Amino acid sequence: MLNDLFPHPLIARTGRIDSWIKNPDGRLPVSCTVFVVDDSIEGDNGIEASWRFVSHALRYGAGVAVHLSKIRPNGHTNEKGLVASGPVSFGKVYSALNETIRRGGVYKNGACVLHLDLDHADILEFITTPRSELPWVKRCVDLTPKMWKDTPYKKELLEGIKSGDIWLNKIKYQYNERIYSNVCLEVYLPSRGTCLLQHVNLAACSIGNIQEGFVTAMSELCDLHARTGVGESGEYLASSLDRQVGLGMLGLANLLRRHGVTYKEFGEALDRVNFGLIPQEGTAAKLAFGIKRGILAASDVAREHGMDRAFAIAPTASCSYNSKDLDGFTACPEIAPPIARSVDRDSGTFGVTSYDYGEVEIASEVGWDAYKRVADGIMTMLNKTGL
């Protein structure tokens, strides 16, 4: 049961949840949402409806991902003789909406991501449009292995990624229905679905209470999911239809530091646990088993509440700044090692603040291979739950 006044010490709530608890009439507790635009100006899910949806999401504190692949390509004429201007032309409207609306209210941090499938006829225009024409949106190309094999625009796509203008994401299905990538590119939703996030603060855990953190955090999330009332707006799916929460993790680097375990050692322990090998004795194995038991127990809670999807590594890294480890240091974002042991956060809303992570391993010490092994190991545990 969600304790509004006294959050559990092993849980890191997002700022959106805290804000909603204090003022349910302001920001909604959901972090982000998705809209799939039909190839029509009018209609419940048409282009004009998408503008209203984006406005609503940004005004109430949610980022929004807009999927444009159903819109006809530029120059296409339909049976009514109407000539399409293409998805990129409408992208400029979403950019202007975000630029204007994110400057109002209390938190000036709106996010809008435009998605287009790699096999869309206008994909080259989408990839190569100058950033100056779409300054307030992020662009993501959605693809399958076959689309990548067949596209003639590999070079342009890779150049767009290299420049920082283009992101990539996999196309996914659940129960034979497509689900759509969110702003973070990690969580997938149906159109008009919302993403409700919370985190286990691993930095505040000991080996013995990791499972407690996962179970309590998932229980709170599922309780909150039924209480948000987001469907009452008429824009979002009701909670009875949108069975999605996202339990993430942060502070892994702090947890490893406190127990004297390196990322390399932890990654090796995760592999042994995941592949059913006899684990070596030691703290790394105990931590790996603790996280596995926590994930499995949390998945049981999610299933009891009828959730279709329930996990995310941690797209909302910013809430780590308000979380501490058992020694009083700031919890590191997500499961990754930080780039430095102290950081300055320059926020247009909160100003400049300094944070100290303690003597954690940093990215340059861990290296890509060791970190990827840890990330793959945790994702394997999450994927095995089917949630």
Image (spheres, rainbow, N blue to C red):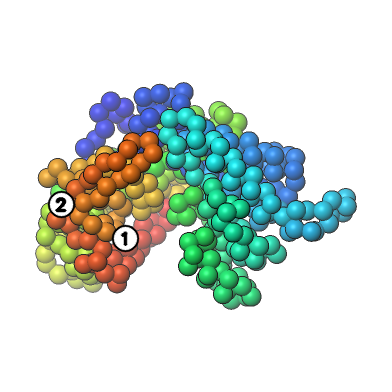
Image position of 244 with respect to 146: above or below = above
Quadrant where the N terminus lies? top left
Going by the image, does 204 lie left or right of 110? left
Answer above or below: position of 74 versus 148.
Answer: above
Q: Give how far across and how far down residue 94 sits, in percent.
A: 61, 45
Label 2 crowd (10 A; few <14 / some 14-19 / many >=20): many
| Residue at x 64% of width, y 44% of height | 93
Along the line of sight, which residue is nearer the eye, 76 or 260? 76
Front in this rendered view, residue 126 or 323: 126
Seen at 38% across and 30% down, the residue is 19
List x then y, in percent, for residue 366.
23, 67
Mark 2 lies on residue:
358
Q: Can residue 190 be seen in this view?
A: no
Q: What residue is shown at x 56% (from left), y 75% (from top)?
A: 155
Q: Which amino acid lies under the numbered mark 1 shown in the image of this protein?
A: Ile
Residue type at tag 2: Gly
Above or below for 30 versus 254: above
Which comes before the other along the chain, label 1 or label 2? 2
Instruction: State the CA–CA distance, disc 1 to disc 2.
Output: 23 Å
Q: In this view, does 316 lie to the left or right of 52?
A: left
Label 1: which residue? 378
